[in-house]
Image (tube, helix red, strand yellow):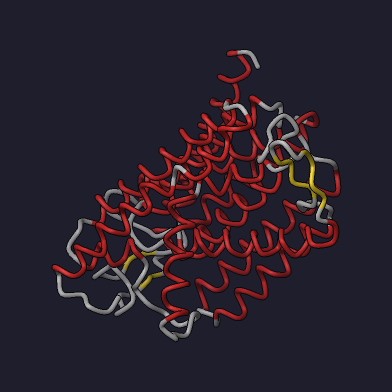
Amino acid sequence: MTWTAFLRHLGFCALLALFSAAIVRGMIGLRVMDKPGLRKAHAHPTPKGGGVGIVAAFMAGVAALYEFAAFSRLAEPYFRGVILASGAIAVVAFLDDLRDWPFTVKLGAQVAAGLAAIASGLYISTYRLPFIGPVDIGWLGAPATLAWILFATNAVNFIDGLDGLAGGVSLIACGFLAEIAVSQDAFFTYFAALLLAAGLVGFLPFNFPRARIFMSDVGSQFCGFVLAMLGVAASRFEKVELSFVVMPVLLSGVLFDVAFTLARRALAGETLTAAHRSHLYQVAHRAGMDARAVAAVHWGFALFGGACCLAFIRAPAPLKPIFVLLPLVPQLSWLQYVSVRSRKAGLERW
């Protein structure tokens, strides 16, 4: 890709970021408020629904992509499946922000959207492994892909509890994914990552360092779903063995926090769907760590994961597993730090 083309893409994304920002500003004016509660970090009523700007910018960009950049589309069934499923997730999540539906309703919508994307043919059935080559898991590919979509979607949703955290991590992941995708000539993934990044750039100034609005489920579920689907698309990078791990490594901080928290709560016999404030990032905040510092730590995890991905792409086959596992090092260090800090703060139960 030429520098001229890249600058044109950035210019288009800048316009989308302004479009996103205008919609986010309008959502603040609507004053649909998120009220404080025992399970929430904010102390004052704050507008919600800022994710509408992210969704609108992404969809506007996709419409332009579909009309003017046919070379960057997925095959028609995949393209329609991904976009329609993403739009459905956004609509249901927005209605949930307004009506506060039970988790089962949200999960049902996510399953339906995931199945719609899978039905279009976008799922992982073949995994390219070092020394082994392609491994086809057949019909198991569809349920495995659905499990990934649900986990990634909800992980980003669960992590959206402090100013700038989910939005910043998603933005960094998009930046690295765009860089990796263009190096693999995967232009749909490249453009989709840039479009999502543009929406996030328009939103984040209203959410960090002090939130004037929250992205809410409409933003966090949408970001999680789109990133999950881009992870599926990345699994098809033909030049890269183990390419299915690209998105999990980029989101390693988010995925580790959610996986650890779910496992710990399950072992403690807690109801997994019940509201709580026991994610590692929430415990760190409750133990006295500044919310902006917690967000910055997670941005650091995303940057480290991105660096590991770039090294992974370039590494010879025998070394690739090292860069897949390397993000566990800061995660385990963070777990130890939060454990010590929570004990000092007297938080015996997370």
Q: Give the total number of marks visible in the rendering.
A: 0
Residue 28 rendering spot, x and y as whole percentages: 39, 58
For the residue pair 258 and 162, the one nearer the viewer reads as: 258
Question: Where is the N terminus found, in terms of image quarters?
Answer: top right
Q: Residue at x 23, y 68 (%)?
A: 286
Question: Where is the C terminus found, in terms of image quarters?
Answer: bottom left
Quarter of image, res 6 = top right
Residue 182 rendering spot, x and y as whole percentages: 64, 27
Q: Is residue 218 above or below residue 105?
A: above
Please indicate whether residue 213 sits to the left or right of residue 158 in the image.
left
Query: In this view of the protein, can residue 154 be seen by the observer?
Result: yes
For the residue pair 218 and 1, the one nearer the viewer reads as: 1
Q: Is residue 207 above or below residue 157?
A: above
Query: In this view of the protein, can residue 198 be seen by the observer?
Result: no
Q: Residue at x 74, y 56 (%)?
A: 84
Please indicate whether residue 157 sits to the left or right of residue 292 in the image.
right
Q: Residue at x 50, y 71 (%)?
A: 97
Residue 130 rendering spot, x and y as whole percentages: 69, 37
Residue 218 rendering spot, x and y as whole percentages: 54, 62
Quarter of image, res 140 = bottom right
Q: Is residue 349 above or below residue 178?
A: below
